[in-house]
Amino acid sequence: FADLVEATFECFGSLPVAALSYPWLTKDHPDPRGANLARVARALKALLTSRCIPRLGVFWDFGSLHQHPDPPNGVLRTEEQNALFKQGLGCLGTLYSHPHTLVLRLTSFPDGHKAEDQAEGTNVAKYFDRGWCYTEQSWAGLTKAGHLSLDLGKMRAGKEYDCRSLVLDCTKAGGRGPPLQPSAFAAELEKKSFTNGKDDKPLVKRLYEAAFEEQFGKATELFYEDLGWGDAE
């Protein structure tokens, strides 16, 4: 594993770890028809064409953190699972903001998904209007190099991608603003939509501030290139 980390880092500038950022499609399941899975698989297939990325571990919240097994029928996480879930949430800031992890952002809904068809109580907001998605994108925009935060919503239908063409398309036109101070982030977060806002909003504010201090506290150089920023940014 040490050899894998060294090879991937030296060649691509990243660790062999990716974190997925995306909007859940329904209240109880993030991807009931596997449409997002297919899009992620397409991106991973392209990334793995590079000799720099022989293998890639992916953090996907639904499969990586304990979920409630059957909420409609009252089957919830055990106490032990709940403790592990909360522990995992506490690590998300580091996972997404680390300067050498890769963040894959599904910023669009898959073809055929219609917000009006979803059950009552489902968060139907788009990626950029969702609290958790906005937070994950903001973490990825702190000290990470531009090619390590990929907007998979920019993938073109029918195009056969390799690693280089995927990175070029998924970083086109920047798609990322300058890092926000925690106070500015908190103000923007008030405009975003949460499924469980009462609990999640104060949590992500704390996690963002911790990640901001962690990454800028240890950064020795910042590599912001081709992001389309002007004088205001």
Image (spheres, rainbow, N blue to C red):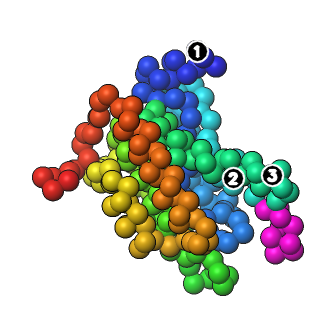
Quarter of the image that includes the N terminus: top right
173 falls in the magenta region: no
State the residue position of label 3: 81
Marks 2 and 1 in Cβ contact (< 8 Å): no
Query: Which residue is at 66% across, 63% downward?
Result: 30
In this view of the protein, which residue sits in the foreground, 162 or 196? 196
Three-letter code, disc 3: Gln
How many numbered marks, from 0 up?
A: 3
State the residue position of label 2: 86
Tell me the CA gap for discs 1 and 3: 33 Å
In this view of the protein, which residue sits in the foreground, 157 or 188? 188
Q: Give the dominant element type of the magenta stretch: helix, strand or loop.
A: loop
Three-letter code, disc 2: Lys
Query: Which residue is at 33% across, 54% downward?
Result: 180
Marks 2 and 3 in Cβ contact (< 8 Å): no
Region of the chain picked out in magenta, as a range: 68-76
Q: Is residue 158 visible?
A: no
